[in-house]
């Protein structure tokens, strides 16, 4: 690929994946080249809607197309691992929706394939590019929070009625949305913060018809994990079935000077807690105050800035957006980060080893829960 040639992108999976098509189409130096879906009718509908002539129902055939530089995988969770490996071996850059895989072996295979290929791999984790996370990260980097003392994430979601691979899925197998901000905020350029071990407990029980799919009985899994080279510990909680709770992806950061707590429910605002001191006393009722989270479209190329806003969502009826609040305006930030990595401007974040670590926190947490809370060391690639 020459410096003057556009990056040609293919999107695989056109439910949630179609949301990214207009973002790529409006990104400078990029050609939204091809789409892939098993269903011919749905493939043609998307191709006609967005004016994309290159269409594939067979993923393997798509990978043979020499014009494709990068693939963005939005397939069902069980396909993430093998599809990513196949694309890297075919010499394509890979962006893949979460999680990276559903086993340590899949994560290892992707890391090895990425290193062998020299291509970019990036797990497209929405939360660390959401406006809420970007706001907390900015507060931390400016010193407003002071020294970080504790981090907490939760992802509570009712998955009844979702596609066939979801029923009974172990909650922590899909934990990157609550794990990732706890590690990303402590990361520095070229030095990602990584989890080294995890302890997890399962609580409650889901219906027997759900348990039979994966052999996972727990309604909720709650884990604490140690962060390598840090005295900060993070806690994450995850539920998928048989638990009454409005959808909530949340991230709390507790600091020595100030703390940020995500809103408890939709249409509420987050809180900033400011520590009182002898030099600057704060009455107890005034320690906690609601805060407005700004948008961060200014960090993006002008052509895709509008896609941080809910009004620009193409498929507003998709469950990912109805339950996920539009993913915090993260989609154009994800595309920008991936393409900057492909163009050699910045390293991917998260890159393959980091994506593996974020994913394996959940995989190893579920293993710990099934062992009654034993500590599990997270493999280091």
Image: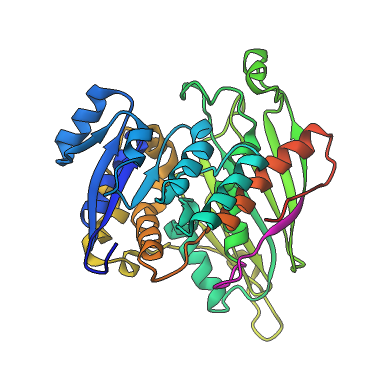
Secondary structure mostly seen in the magenta stretch: loop
Give how far across and how far down residue 204 sits, in percent: 73, 27
Towards the viewer: 59 or 191: 59
Whether the magenta-drawn stretch holds residue 188 is answered as yes
Quadrant location of the N terminus in the rendered image? bottom left
Quadrant location of the C terminus in the rendered image? bottom right
Towards the viewer: 106 or 201: 106
Q: Does any portion of residue 118 appear in the rendered image?
A: yes
Q: Is residue 305 above or below residue 345?
A: above
Q: Is residue 253 above or below residue 198?
A: below
Q: In this view, does 285 lie above or below 248?
A: below
360 sits left or right of 199 in the view? left
361 sits left or right of 247 in the view? right
131 sits left or right of 116 in the view? left
Whether the magenta-drawn stretch holds residue 128 is answered as no
Question: Toward which corner of the image does residue 226 lie, by quadrant?
Answer: bottom right
Give how far across and how far down residue 347 sits, in percent: 47, 67
Q: Which residue lies furthest to the bottom in this view?
A: 279
Q: Which residue is drawn at 42% across and 50% down?
A: 95
Give how far across and how far down residue 311 sits, in percent: 25, 48
Q: What stretch is highlighted in magenta?
A: 186-197
Q: In this view, does 344 lie above or below 22?
A: below
Q: Which residue is drawn at 71% across and 28% down?
A: 218
Give how far across and how far down residue 74 sits, in percent: 40, 39
Q: Which residue is drawn at 70% across and 37% down?
A: 221
């Amino acid at each position: 690929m020459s410096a003057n040639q556009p990056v040609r992108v293919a999107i695989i999976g056109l439910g949630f994946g179609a949301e990214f098509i207009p973002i790529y189409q409006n990104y400078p130096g990029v050609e939204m080249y091809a789409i892939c879906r098993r269903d011919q009718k749905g493939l043609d509908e998307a191709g006609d809607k967005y004016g994309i002539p290159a269409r594939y129902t067979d993923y393997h055939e798509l990978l043979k197309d020499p014009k494709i530089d990068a693939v963005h995988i939005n397939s069902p969770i069980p396909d993430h691992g093998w599809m990513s490996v196949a694309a890297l071996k075919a010499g394509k850059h890979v962006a893949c929706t979460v999680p990276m895989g559903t086993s340590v072996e899949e994560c290892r295979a992707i890391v090895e394939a990425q290193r062998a290929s020299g291509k970019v791999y990036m797990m497209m984790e929405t939360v660390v590019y959401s406006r809420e996370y970007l706001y907390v990260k900015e507060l931390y980097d400016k010193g407003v929070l002071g020294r970080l003392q504790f981090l907490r994430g939760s992802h509570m979601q009712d998955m009844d009625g979702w596609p066939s691979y979801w029923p009974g899925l172990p909650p922590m197998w899909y934990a990157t949305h609550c794990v990732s901000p706890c590690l990303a905020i402590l990361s520095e350029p070229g030095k990602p913060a990584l989890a080294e071990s995890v302890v997890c407990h399962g609580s409650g029980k889901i219906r027997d018809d759900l348990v039979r799919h994966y052999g996972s009985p727990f309604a909720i899994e709650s884990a604490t994990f140690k962060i390598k080279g840090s005295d900060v510990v993070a806690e994450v909680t995850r539920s998928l079935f048989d638990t009454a709770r409005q959808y909530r992806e949340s991230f709390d950061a507790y600091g020595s000077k100030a703390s940020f707590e995500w809103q408890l429910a939709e249409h509420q605002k987050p809180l900033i807690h400011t520590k009182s001191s002898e030099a600057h006393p704060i009455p107890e009722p005034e320690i906690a105050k609601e805060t407005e989270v700004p948008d961060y479209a200014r960090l993006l190329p002008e052509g895709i800035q509008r896609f941080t806003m809910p009004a620009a969502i193409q498929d507003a009826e998709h469950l990912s957006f109805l339950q996920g609040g539009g993913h915090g305006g993260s989609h154009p930030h994800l595309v920008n980060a991936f393409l900057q990595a492909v163009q050699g401007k910045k390293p991917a974040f998260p890159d393959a080893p980091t994506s593996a670590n974020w994913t394996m926190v959940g995989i190893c947490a579920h293993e710990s829960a099934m062992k009654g809370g034993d500590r599990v060391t997270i493999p280091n690639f």
